[in-house]
Amino acid sequence: MDSESDEAFPASIEAAWGLRERPHKGPKRGLTLQGIVSAAVKVADEEGLDAVSMSRVGAELGSSTMALYRYLATKDELLALMLDTALGPPPPLPEGLGWRRGLESWATSMRAAILAHPWTVRLLAPKGPPATPNQLAWLDQFLRILQDTGLPASAKLATQLLISGHVWSHVSITAAIMLDTDPGSRRRWSAYEPFLRRVTGEGRLPGVRAALDEGAFGEDPHAADRHFAFGLERALDGVEAHIRSLG
C-alpha cells in the first residue's frame, strides 16, 4: 500500500487483510490478531461490550496486556475488528433472485447478523469509510445485486445507505430492548398501552389514540418483524420506481 494509505489505515486493518505480516516475536507463542479479536467478541457476548478492555482480553487469552499492543495500537482498532468478526461475511445468495429479492435477503441477513451480537449496535456509527474485510464484503455483495439494474454507481451507493440505514434504525431499537436488564424499563414497556389510554383521553393526541384503538401499541411479539418488513418494502418500492424511470 502507498504511504498515504499506510498513514490513514491502522496496521491492524492491513493485517486483517493479510497485507502486513504479523509480529515475528512476541511474549506469548501462538498469539494472533484473529485470536485476540475472537477472544474480545467472546467477552462481549458473555459480559457485555463495557467489559471489553485490553487487559480483560489479555486475561481471557492468558497473556499480558502489553502483548496485545504488538497487534493492536488502540482499543478502537480492536472494536472495529470485533464488529467485523461479529458480522461475519454475508451469506451466499441463491441464483436468480433478482435485484429486489436479493436486497430483501441482504437486509434480512444483515439484521440477523447484528442481532446475533446485540452489542454491535453500539459500534455501527461509522468513524470512517468501511475498511475491514467483512464490512467491505457486505458492501460488495450489495453492489453486485444491483449490477444489472442500470443504476449508476453513485445511485447504487446511495441505495446501500438507504437500506442499511433502515436496518440500523430497526436493530438499534430491538437491540436496546434485548440488552436492557433494568426491571423498571421492562415494567414501563408492559404498562405503556394503559398509560397511553390515560394520556389520550378527552380528545388529546387524536392520532395516537386512533392508532391505540386499532391495536398498534399492543404487545405483539412479531411487531418488530412486521415493521421492519413494511419499511423495507416501501424503500424498495421507491428504488424500483426510480429504476423504471431510467428505462
Image (cartoon, grey):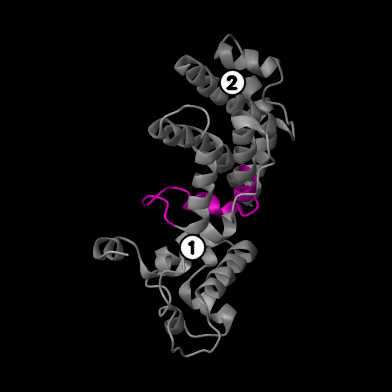
Q: Is residue 114 above or below residue 45?
A: above
Image x and y of residue 35, in percent: 56, 74
Specify few, some or many for label 1: CA neighbours under 10 Å numbering under 14, 14-19, or 20 or more: many
The residue nearer to you, when weighing 20 against 62, is 20
Residue drawn at x 47%, y 32% is 159
Q: Is residue 230 above or below residue 142?
A: above
Residue drawn at x 43%, y 47% is 125
Image x and y of residue 28, in percent: 51, 89
Q: Is residue 166 visible to the viewer in this orientation of the structure? A: no
Amino acid bearing label 2: Val
Q: Is residue 46 left or right of residue 79?
A: right
Amino acid bearing label 1: Leu
Magenta includes 114? yes
Question: Can you identify the residue that label 1 sits on?
Answer: 81
Image x and y of residue 47, in percent: 61, 65
Q: Is residue 196 above or below residue 159?
A: above
State which region is magenta: 111-131
Q: Is residue 157 visible to the viewer in this orientation of the structure? A: yes
Q: Is residue 243 left or right of residue 113?
A: left
Residue drawn at x 58%, y 54% is 87
Magenta includes 216? no
Q: How far is disc 2 from disc 1 in space, using C-alphas?
A: 46 Å
Question: Can you identify the residue that label 2 sits on?
Answer: 199
The residue nearer to you, when weighing 80 against 139, is 139
Q: In front of the other: label 2 or label 1?
A: 1
Q: Quadrant of residue 30?
A: bottom right
Q: Secondary structure at mark 1?
A: helix
Q: Are marks 2 and 1 in contact (CB under 8 Å)?
A: no
The residue nearer to you, when weighing 197 against 101, is 101
Position of the N terminus, as image quadrant, is bottom left
